Image (spheres, grey):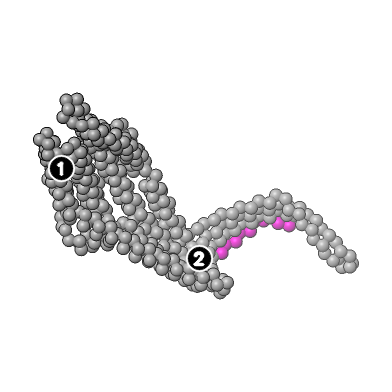
Amino acid sequence: MEATSHDPTYLKARADHAAIQENVSISRASLLPSITAESRNTPKNAQSITVRAPSEEYLTFKRRYSSHSASVTLQQPLFDLRRWNQLKQSKAAAEASRYNLMEASQNLMIRVFEAYIEALYAKDQYQIARSQHDAYAEELKRNQSAYRIGDATRTDVAETQAQLAASEVALEDANDAMLVAMQNLSQITGSKISGIGAIASIKPGYIDHLPQLKTQDIGHWKSLALNNNRRLLQARKSVEEARIARTKAKSEYAPTVSLVADHTRNTPRTDETLDHRYRTSSIGVAVSIPLYSGGSTNATVRQVNHEIESRMRNAEAITHDIMTNLEQKHRLLTSGLLRITARQRAVKAAQTALTGNRVAVIVGDRVNIDILDATQQLYSARSALNRAVYDNLKAIIYLKYYAGILAPSDIEDIDKLFEG
């Protein structure tokens, strides 16, 4: 998908995930040995020594010399609860970040699909507006011809002219909406869409190929959402991370034990120690016991408790939001086919009414305004049918999105309904 290499929202989520992943390596490194080397060279040293001689007078000796020292120190944590819990917290944060990236991927599919569907709908609306405009233009020609031979009134011509003028405005609005929809689709995918011909049209007989649910059971879909929705999983993992952070904060009370090994070489160059070298090696265990920190540890624990409460409430709110949207899309989808077939009947009835009104005007049972009204009803019915079809397609994609099982193949199945 081109959008994965272009969409800034997805790219940000991917970069955030990569950055958070590094925290695991950083935390793990704090539990491994650390070795440091230090070298110090002081070419100029001055020393002044004053001593009291037996004669009661003070003698001062001054000397200059150089010295060099080098050391290697190894430290290995043996017992450090804070660092162990930091590693656990980093792993939990990385897992939450992984869910966030997966959510960003599914959200990108949704946004691309939404932009695509809206572009298709805008194209259909433009074509309907164009057809309606052309229908009024043809009607105006008929009215003018009939007026010239006395079969129509000036009012009939004026009424049709008014409808034609209104349809011109509607056509311009539909064209603007289509251009905006195409621009949105181009922006999110990063690919240029050159004109109306670049947008597909739905195939004839599409109603027999609309995607169907494997099960209508709402409980099944709710169960899928609770177990698979990436946004919800990320919120739960965030709560787990906060709880580990509380354990880490409490571990500040615990002592730490480290193994420390050191080797030092010192070479002073004075008259007395010329060519002398001193080597010192030591190994031992360092124990650090926290006694008092001004209350910062207690405050940190309280702070993390509040953070846990906040994240738990956030997870509850997300669960409620997901369940509400899931039920809404499920209701829309279960009644979607009935809506579409009803809209199809409405279009057929409107077409029949328009034909009947044309005949009725000829025999004098109807007037011109009845034809204009019937024309308006026909194209309104066509527009409503298009909306019902696209809403049905969006409902099945959103249902799978909220259930956490949306896959690229689901988008491909929808795409098979279109041609061009």
Q: Which residue is mark 2?
A: 259
337 or 208, which lies in front? 337
Residue 73 position within the rendered picture, expressed as x and y whole percent measured from the top left: 55, 59
Quarter of the image with the C terminus in it: top left
Quarter of the figure that contains the N terminus: top left
Q: Which element is circle 2 on? A: strand
Q: What residue type is disc 2 on?
A: Leu
Q: The residue under label 1 is which amino acid type?
A: Ala
Is residue 276 located in the magenta-colored stretch of the structure?
Answer: yes
The disc, 2 or 1, on the residue closer to the chain's N-terminal end is 2
The magenta stretch is 272-282
Which picture quadrant has residue 272? bottom right
The front one of 122 and 354 is 354
- SS of the residue under disc 1: helix
The residue nearer to you, when weighing 18 against 264, is 18
Q: Is residue 9 magenta?
A: no
Residue 359: image x %, image y %? 10, 36
The residue shown at (70%, 49%) is 43
Question: In which quadrant of the rendered view does residue 186 lie?
Answer: top left
At x 73%, y 53%, the residue is 45
**In the image, which disc is placed on residue 350?**
1
